[in-house]
């Protein structure tokens, strides 16, 4: 399994902790978030992990280089420009094998999700993209039809909706969990990495011609620790071994 850990972000929700640290080095207990993510990926079969860097990049690279990892670890350097999720993935494209799917994982996500099951579901479904989702309250929702195909995105706070085609009469919302499996062919379909751009609008666009679906997990198997209140919860919530 090859994986991409998104660790370049500014971590604004975790200020003031991230004023002097990259988000990836914020700790849960005695472990930095990036170590938790790497250990979980190794435990579940990752053999190659790419990590992007930008905010306090030297601190993160120094930490990564000082550790002994049971995995091939590669850095995608975004020091010159923070590229957001879509641009970051495109910039790192040359670092991935074209022969197997890529698991994309936000560094501030803790989960008990079984990546073997996610990987198998993705492969069996012949999806270009498989989004890990659950049923939980969130301001931003992914919208799917009865065939589990992505048909739109909705922001409850602003009431903004983006549709793949015309507005759908029947659909159901799911909450995205910051973990995705993509086919390596996706990388060729993304715009150039000469500017920052988010990935979800790209999925909306690509869903017109490609299979973009989901893998549902239990909402209790997941925790977003990118904000102070959930970071506190994480002290007693760690991925199962």
Image (cartoon, rainbow, N blue to C red):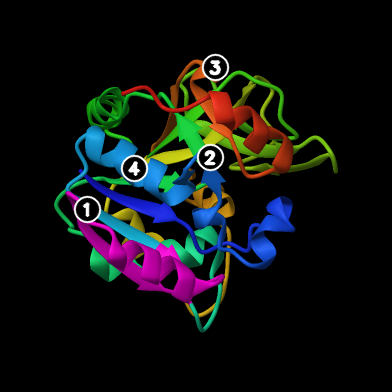
Asked if residue 46 shows in the view, the reply is yes
Q: Residues under labels 4 and 2: Cα distance?
A: 33 Å
Of tags 4 and 2, the one toward the viewer is 2
| Span of residues in magenta | 52-78
Circle nearer the viewer, 4 or 1: 1
Circle 1 sits on which residue? 69
Which mark sits nearer the N-terminus, 3 or 1?
Answer: 1
| Camera sees residue 90 | no
Residues at badges 4 and 1 in contact (C-beta under 8 Å)?
Answer: no
Which residue matches tag 3? 220
Give the residue furthest to the front: 30
**x, y percentage for residue 63?**
38, 64
As helix, strand or loop, the secondary structure at mark 4 comes to loop
Task: Tell me: 156 left or right of 238.
Answer: right
Label 3 environment density (alpha carbons within 10 Å; few <14, some 14–19, many ≥20): few
Q: Is residue 87 magenta?
A: no
Q: Secondary structure at mark 3?
A: helix
In the picture as drawn, the residue positioned furthest to the bottom comes out as 80
Where does the C terminus fall, quadrant-wise?
A: top left
User: What secondary structure is marked by label 2?
Assistant: strand
Disc 1 secondary structure class: loop
Residue 238 against residue 195 in the figure, above or below: above
| Residue wearing tag 4 | 128
Residue 202 is situated, as x and y percent measured from the top left of the image, at 52, 54
């Amino acid at each position: 399994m090859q994986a991409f850990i998104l660790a370049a972000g500014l971590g604004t929700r975790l200020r003031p902790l991230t004023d002097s640290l990259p988000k990836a080095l914020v700790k849960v207990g005695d472990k930095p978030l990036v170590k938790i993510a790497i250990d979980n990926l190794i435990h579940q079969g990752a053999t190659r992990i790419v990590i992007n860097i930008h905010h306090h990049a030297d601190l993160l690279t120094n930490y990564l280089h000082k550790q002994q990892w049971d995995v091939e670890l590669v850095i995608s350097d975004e020091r010159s420009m923070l590229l957001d999720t879509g641009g970051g993935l495109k910039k790192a494209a040359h670092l991935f094998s074209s022969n197997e799917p890529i698991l994309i994982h936000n560094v501030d996500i803790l989960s008990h999700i079984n990546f073997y099951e996610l990987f198998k579901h993705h492969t069996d479904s012949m999806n270009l993209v498989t989004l890990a989702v659950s049923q939980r309250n969130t301001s931003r929702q992914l919208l799917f039809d009865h065939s589990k195909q992505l048909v739109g995105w909705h922001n409850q706070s602003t009431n903004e909706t983006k549709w793949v085609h015309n507005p759908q009469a029947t659909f159901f919302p799911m909450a995205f969990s910051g973990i995705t499996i993509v086919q390596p062919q996706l990388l060729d379909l993304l715009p150039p990495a000469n500017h920052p751009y988010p990935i979800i609008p790209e999925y909306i666009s690509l869903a017109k011609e490609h299979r973009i679906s989901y893998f549902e997990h239990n909402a209790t198997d997941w925790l977003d620790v990118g904000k102070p209140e959930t970071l506190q919860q994480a002290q007693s919530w760690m991925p199962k071994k």
